[in-house]
Amino acid sequence: MVAVQVIVGGLLLGAIYALFSSGLTLIWGMMNFINFAHGEFVMLGMYVALLVVVYIGGGPAIFGIAAAVALAVLGIAIYFSLIRHVIRGPMLAQILSTFGLALLLRYTAFWIFSANFVSLPANALSGTVSLAGVYLPVAQLVAGIVAIVLTIGLHLLLTRTAVGSKLLAVAEDRTAAMLMGIRPDRMQALAWGLSAGAAGIAGALMAIAYPWSPSVGETFVLIAFVVVALGGFGSVLGSLYAGLITGLIQAVSAFWLGAIYKDIVVYGLFVALLWLRPQGLMGKA
């Protein structure tokens, strides 16, 4: 029964990995652009949740929405102020711009919030629940389920709606999309808003169950790159599968081998899979 609990816990954590990684794969799929600041978006979502709880006493629903909206607005602002000016430049300029942005956001958070670990106070999701004899924290269970629903929702938005068709049209051929009356700048700004918003709400969900500090973004961005590469760059559904797999591998390896080995196992399997299937699980060759 303990093993089942470990497996379920790993899948729930992997669902949150999938949610914030889907935002990273969206940006790559639309623009072939690598965002090294994506982990800091998740970190900021956690602090938005904390501020909402501390200053207005909002519950999980309120701070989750607040984190999504705040980070979506930030993502759009970053696109218009920075990204659109470097997106057509050399790859090195793109890499350095988002790497510098990551450092700016991280050390601004250090300046405002200090380097101490913090966590959300007890809320409506505190406590545990028993499901068929498996005891799970309510916060972790709710966070994982919400993350799965939102990731599937993002996939459906991209594949089943007019907005999603416009986003994919810009990703396929920017010039042809312009000739069809689509404004690429608006669509790419929307993509950055969706990407940052997904990271923000994933951060709020992580904050429900785990403590954090401003440096946590470094860990999240590495996990996001692993998930996106495993799932296939540009595939939101692939990020969902890869996120669940990554969370499961981490949980099982930590249980059987020890917590210090979980990342070694994940990155080792990651390298092995890319050697056998470089395009990832659902990416195009």
Image (cartoon, rainbow, N blue to C red):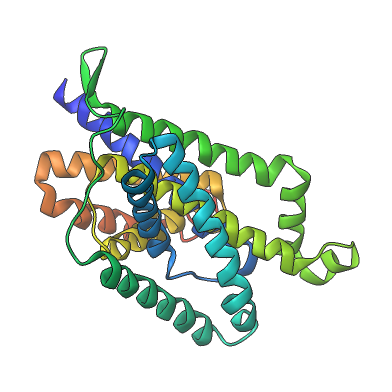
Q: Which residue lies furthest to the front in this view?
A: 56
| Left or right: residue 233 compared with residue 31 | left
Image quarter in which the C terminus is found:
bottom right
Q: Which of 203 and 113 is in front in this view?
A: 113
Q: Nearer the viewer, residue 163 or 240?
A: 163
Q: Which of 24 and 112 is in front in this view?
A: 112
Image quarter in which the N terminus is found:
top left
Above or below for 22 versus 132: below
Q: Residue furthest top?
A: 132
Q: Residue 11 sits in which quadrant?
A: top left
Q: Position of residue 81 (x, y in %)?
A: 60, 77
Q: Which residue is found at the position 26% from the left and 65% from the top?
A: 215
Q: Position of residue 216 (x, y in %)?
A: 27, 60
Above or below for 134 versus 260: above
Above or below for 254 versus 98: above
Q: Which residue is found at the position 60% from the left and 64% from the top?
A: 76
Q: How many labels does the image show?
A: 0
Residue 245 visible in the picture: no
Q: Where is residue 128 in the image (x, y as percent from the top left)?
A: 22, 23
Q: Position of residue 124 (x, y in %)?
A: 31, 27
Residue 236 visible in the picture: yes
Q: Which residue is found at the position 25% from the left and 29% from the top?
A: 126
Q: Residue 44 sits in which quadrant?
A: bottom left
| Left or right: residue 135 compared with residue 57 | left
Q: Residue 31 sits in which quadrant?
A: bottom right
Above or below for 156 versus 177: above
